[in-house]
Image (tube, rainbow, N blue to C red):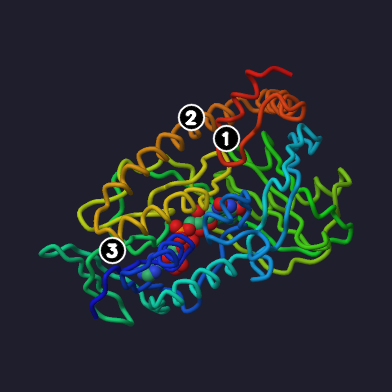
């Protein structure tokens, strides 16, 4: 098979590029029989990221059934689940359905005339005489002008090229649950500096009318399931909510950086988790995809990856700064929560703005004073 662009991996990164690509034909090769399956992601992003990923506004995302929740507040809890700070926005964040996001992006890619093939396990990618040759089980050989490597870091085929450099990961687990005590549907909670999720954090996010929620945590410490139970019991003891039934479980690797040194080589471009491009404090990877996918699509249309590499260099610097800030915050433990409370107070008084995606904006709020 011959194509303009071969996209390896039908996750949000690969599909967001294909959905934007016009005037060049593309084939998305996805190993799983069902897009986005098995799911591993909570899908909480800023409204700006939701719109950047899809090119659609929140109203359209709602009518496409991709918007599971809209949050006006993030509540930061300290080790004993006491409230440290509330961050507000209008809205502050939304929860995208995963894998509903993948289904939407795939239909947008198909509407551009691209092919999305499932059960297509890419086993090798190589460049040869100015072309890219992709070997995919279930499809055969695909020859392309460019390959977009968006296979993520969850189930990695060992022979697929990755950018140089390390990428640290933290295992995460999440349950979708029904609640016997309804949560207000417009706030989500995160637990920090706690022995329950050392080195990272735990989260609780209501879905819909607050009778269901996702509850999860990530940490390198052993015993994820027992830790998740401990988190649920802590929330119950503190009267935040009470849990009734577990509807489903998911898990995966949360990335903590550092962002890869380069995003392209010859006719190969990486995007998404292959770039280790997460916001290191939360592990949110969709922010970087929303920034990079439109730039990569345009670069592929023009047949020159230079502008994409330039966009990556800018974003990478920001993600590296976020990583340094995240490492400092984790090392500070509860002292960080006290600083966070000060930053939140400054933001509440309108002295500064905390950007949900640029965690280094906290420093501006600290400088703004209480
Ligand atoms: C528990 C958890 C919670 C998270 N919560 C959030 C959140 O709230 N907000 C946020 O922004 N981010 C979150 N993330 C991170 C987010 O899930 C990732 O950053 C995002 O999914 C990256 O998208 P991707 O397309 O690069 O990779 P993936 O989503 O991993 O997609 C890669 C795709 O490639 C396919 N693939 C792999 N190998 C091959 C192969 N050889 N051939 C063909 N196909 C292949 C896979 O099957 C998969 O479909 C979370 C992650 C975890 C683990």
Give the vertical position of 187 relative to 360 (above or below): below
Left-right relation of 87 to 217: right
Near mark 2 (Cα within 10 A), the count class, few <14, some 14-19 or many ≥20, is some
Q: At x 54% / y 26%, what residue is drawn?
A: 328
Q: Which one is earlier in the sequence, the residue at label 1 or at label 3?
A: 3
Q: In which quarter of the image is residue 294?
A: bottom left
* Residue under pointer 1: 359
Left-right relation of 315 to 172: left
Q: At x 13% / y 62%, what residue is drawn?
A: 130
Q: Which of 233 and 273 is in front in this view?
A: 273
Residue 152 drawn at (x, y percent): 42, 58
Q: Does the residue labelled 2 lie within 8 Å of ligand 1?
A: no
Q: How far apart are marks 2 and 1 (CA)?
A: 11 Å
* Residue under pointer 2: 324
Q: Which one is earlier in the sequence, the residue at label 2 or at label 3?
A: 3
* Residue under pointer 3: 147
Q: Which one is earlier in the sequence, the residue at label 2 or at label 1?
A: 2
Query: Which of the image's four quarters has the C terminus?
Result: top right
Q: Distance between the residues labelled 2 and 3?
A: 32 Å
Residue 72 drawn at (x, y percent): 75, 47
Residue 308 drawn at (x, y percent): 33, 49
What's the mark number on residue 78?
Answer: none
Q: Are marks 2 and 1 in contact (CB under 8 Å)?
A: no
Q: Distance between the residues labelled 1 and 3?
A: 32 Å
């Amino acid at each position: 098979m011959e194509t303009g662009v071969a996209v390896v991996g039908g996750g949000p990164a690969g599909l967001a590029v294909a959905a934007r690509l016009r005037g060049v034909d593309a084939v998305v090769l996805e190993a799983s029989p069902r897009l986005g399956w098995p799911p591993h992601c909570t899908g909480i992003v800023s409204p700006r990221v939701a719109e950047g990923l899809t090119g659609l506004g929140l109203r359209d995302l709602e009518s496409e059934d991709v918007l599971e929740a809209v949050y006006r507040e993030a509540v930061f809890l300290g080790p004993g689940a006491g409230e440290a700070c509330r961050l507000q926005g209008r809205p502050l964040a939304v929860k995208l359905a995963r894998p509903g996001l993948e289904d939407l992006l795939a239909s947008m890619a198909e509407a551009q005339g691209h092919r999305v093939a499932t059960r297509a396990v890419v086993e090798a990618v190589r460049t040869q005489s100015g072309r890219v040759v992709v070997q995919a089980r279930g499809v055969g050989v695909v020859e392309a002008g460019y390959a977009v490597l968006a296979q993520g870091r969850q189930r990695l085929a060992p022979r697929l090229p990755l950018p140089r450099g390390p990428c640290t990961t933290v295992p995460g687990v999440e349950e979708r649950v029904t609640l016997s005590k309804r949560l207000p549907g417009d706030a989500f909670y995160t637990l920090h500096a706690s022995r329950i999720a050392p080195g990272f954090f735990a989260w609780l996010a209501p879905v819909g009318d607050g009778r269901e929620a996702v509850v999860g945590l990530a940490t390198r410490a052993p015993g994820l399931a027992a830790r998740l139970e401990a988190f649920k019991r802590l929330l119950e003891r503190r009267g935040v909510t009470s849990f009734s039934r577990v509807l489903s479980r998911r898990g995966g690797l949360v990335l903590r950086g550092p962002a890869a040194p380069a995003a392209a080589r010859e006719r190969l471009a990486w995007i998404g988790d292959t770039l280790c491009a997460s916001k290191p404090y939360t592990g949110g990877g969709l922010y970087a995809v929303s920034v990079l996918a439109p730039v990569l699509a345009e670069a592929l249309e023009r047949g020159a990856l230079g502008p994409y590499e330039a966009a990556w260099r800018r974003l990478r610097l920001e993600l590296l700064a976020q990583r340094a800030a995240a490492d400092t915050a984790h090392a500070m433990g509860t002292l960080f929560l006290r600083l966070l409370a000060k930053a939140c107070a400054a933001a509440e008084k309108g002295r500064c703005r905390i950007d949900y995606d640029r965690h280094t904006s906290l420093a501006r709020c600290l400088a703004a004073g209480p």
